[in-house]
Amino acid sequence: MKAMLLKRVVSLRDNPEPLTLEDVPVPEPAPDEVLIQISACGVCHTELDEIEGRTPPSVLPMIPGHEVVGRVTEKGDRVTRHEVGDRVGVGWIFKSTGNDNENISDDFVATGRDANGGYAEYMTAHERYTYRIPDCFTDYEAAPLLCAGGVGYRALKLTNILDGDILGLTGFGGSGHLVLQLARHLYPKSPTYVFARSAEERKFALELGAAWAGDTSDRPPQPLHAIIDTTPAWRPVLAALKCLRPGGRLVINAIRKENTDSALMAEIDYAEHLWQEKELKTVANVTSQDIGAFLDIAAEAGIRPEVQVYPLEEANRALCELHSGHVRGAKVLAIGQSGTG
C-alpha cells in the first residue's frame, strides 16, 4: 500500500517535505482490531507538533494522521461492534483504559504518533475506538469531525457555559469553525465572538454566524464568560485573559504550544490577567465518549465542515499551508475512494 512516512523529526521551515511517499505492507488486524481501507484523512495541527518534535512519535518511521475515514475490509476474531463494509472513523485516541479519565491515562496511545495512522491506504484500529459515521456526512466532511470536532466538543464542555453566556473563540481553523456551529446549536442564546489574525478567517466566522469578529489583539464589545484558544502561540493566551469577565474561564485546546513567543508569558500581570477568580484550563486529548457523542450531535445539528481536499501525495503541501496559516475550515487528504459516500 502507499503511505506517507515521517522518518525523522524536522523543522518545516528548513524542510518543507518532511514526509516521504513509500510502498509498505498492508497491516494485519489483531483479534480485537479491524482493517480499514482509508478514503479520507484530515490534516491536523498536531501533525505539525509531531513533525517538529513538540510531541514526537514514540517510534520512527511513523505514518501520521488521526482524522481517518474508511470502510472495514477485515476484522479480527473477537470484533463484535463492526462488520465488513461498515463505514467507520478513527480519531486521536487509538487505545486507552476505557474509563472516564482515559484521555489522561499513562496507557493513552495516540493515532499517528504512537501507532500508525491514516496518511495511508490502509490502517488497523481497535474496535472500541472505531466509530460508525452518520450517513449525512461525506467521507471528506466526516474526517475533521473525528479530532477537530471531537476535541472541540470536549473544549466546549470544559468552558462550563450556560445558554446565554458569551463565548469567545481564539483562532478559527479546523476546530473553531466546527465549535462555532456546535455552540449555536447547544447554546442558541449565546453570542460567539471570534478572534483571528486573518481577515479571511474573520469573514468566514461572520458568515457562519459569529456575533463579532476581530483581531487577536482586539477587545470585544463586552467581556466574555469563556474563551476557547486553539492557536499554537502564547500571545493569544495573554490577550484572551484580558477579555474574560470576573469568574471567566480560558480553555486552551492544544496538544502543545510553540516556543517562538513563550517569553511573552513573563509579562503576565496578576491584576489584569488572572485576578477576580479567572480560570485557565487545558484540554488533554479526547475520550472515545467525546467522539461518539459529538458525531451524533453533529448529525442532529446539521453541522457542515468546510474542507479543502488534497491528494495523499500532496500531504506535505497541505501541512506547509497549515503551518503558514493558510486555512479556511479543515484540510483533508483524499485516499483511494471518492470520499463522497
Image (cartoon, helix red, strand yellow):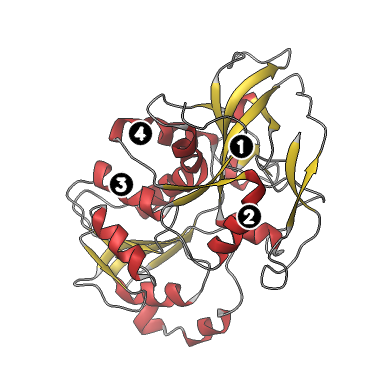
Dot 3 or dot 1: first in sequence order is 3
Q: Are marks 1 and 4 in contact (CB under 8 Å)?
A: no
- Residue beneath label 1, please? 335
Ranked by sequence position, the earlier of labels 1 and 4 is 4
Residue at (54%, 61%) from the top-left corner? 322
Q: Nearer the viewer, residue 314 or 132?
A: 314
Q: CA distance from mark 2 to mark 1?
A: 17 Å
Using the numbered discs, state the Cα–Cα distance from disc 3 to disc 2 in whole angstroms: 24 Å
> Which callout, 3 or 4, points to the residue nearer the camera?
3
- Determine which of the numbered discs, if any, sits on residue 297 in the image: 4
User: Disc 3 vs disc 1: Cβ atoms closer than 8 Å?
Assistant: no
- Callout 1 secondary element: loop
Q: Secondary structure at mark 3?
A: helix
Residue picked out by circle 3: 181
Residue 137: x and y in percent read 41, 31
> Is residue 65 visible to us here?
no
Tags 4 and 2 touching, CB below 8 Å: no
Q: Mark 1 and mark 4: span between their CA atoms?
A: 26 Å
Q: Nearer the viewer, mark 3 or mark 1?
A: 1
Question: Hey, what amino acid is under mark 3?
Answer: Gln
Above or below residue 107? Residue 194 is below
Amino acid at dot 1:
Ile
Give the quadrant of the N terminus: top right
Expressed as whole percent of the image width and height from the top left, the position of residue 323 reads 57, 65
- At label 1, counting other C-alpha atoms closer than 10 Å, the crowd grade (few under 14, some 14-19, many 20 or more) is many
Q: Residue at x 63, y 24 (%)?
A: 127
Sequence-first disc among 4 and 2: 2
Q: Nearer the viewer, residue 140 or 212?
A: 140
Of pointers 3 and 4, the one earlier in the residue sequence:
3
Instruction: Tell me which corner region of the image, top left, top right, bottom left or bottom right, holds residue 114.
Output: top right
Task: Please report contact status of discs 3 and 2: CB closer than 8 Å, yes or no.
Answer: no
* Residue identified by numbered label 2: 47
